[in-house]
Image (cartoon, helix red, strand yellow):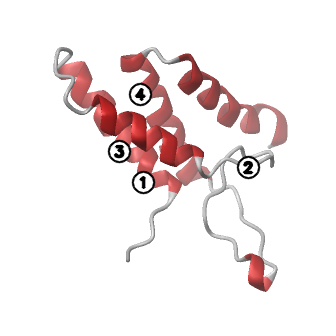
Amino acid sequence: DYPSYPYQYGMALAGYGAFRRHHPDERLLDGKAASLHGWLNLWRWPEGSFYRNGYGNERHGVPDCANSDDNCHMGRGLVAYHAVSGRRDVLRDAEGLAGYYLAEV
């Protein structure tokens, strides 16, 4: 098994957005992109960073942290996905992540 992390879902959504910008009528991957967004949201938590990054270890008392590079990949993926899908929930997620930098940092 290979572990997956939320930044990988963001990178995949950014790639999907680029693909759809160049191929606006190609809908074959739309369901996959929706699944990627759903999997990314499994990493949501009530902390300021909006998404966990997957680097903490509860068993050893190491809290998860917000990593700016990882958050960048998640954010650019959400924005790219919203740009081609128009989904309001995706925009709300992007705004929630951006809120970390506007209010917490």
Identity, as a three-letter code, of the amino acid under mark 2: Trp
Residue in front for this viewpoint, 19 or 40: 40
Q: Earlier in the sequence, mark 3 or mark 2?
A: 3
Helix, strand or loop at label 4? It is: helix
Residue at mark 1 = 8
Q: Which mark is drawn over residue 46? A: none
How far is mark 3 from mark 2, CA to CA? 21 Å
Residue at image coords 60%, 65%: 54
Q: Tag 3: residue type? A: Ala
Q: Amino acid at mark 1?
A: Gln
Seen in the picture, residue 93 relative to 41 is either above or below; the reply is above
Mark positioned earlier in the residue sequence (3 or 4): 3
- Residue 12, by quadrant, is top left
Which residue was labeled with disc 4? 81
Residues under labels 2 and 1: Cα distance? 18 Å
Residue placed under numbered mark 3 in the picture = 12
Mark 2 lies on a secondary structure that is loop
- For label 1, the crowd category at 10 Å Cα-Cα, with few meaning under 14, some 14 to 19 and many 20 or more, is some
Residue 14 can be seen in this image? no
Cα separation between marks 4 and 1 = 14 Å
- The quadrant holding residue 98 is top right
Residue 84: horizontal and vertical position, in percent? Answer: 36, 18
Quarter of the image that includes the C terminus: top right
How many numbered tags mark residues here? 4
Q: Secondary structure at mark 3?
A: helix
**Residue on which disc 2 sits:** 45
Binning the other alpha carbons within 10 Å of mark 3 as few (below 14), some (14 to 19) or many (20 upward) gives: many
Q: Secondary structure at mark 1?
A: helix
Q: Where 34 sits versus 5, above or below?
A: above
Q: Nearer the viewer, mark 3 or mark 2?
A: 2
Q: Position of residue 58 (x, y in %)?
A: 76, 76
Q: Quadrant of residue 21?
A: top left
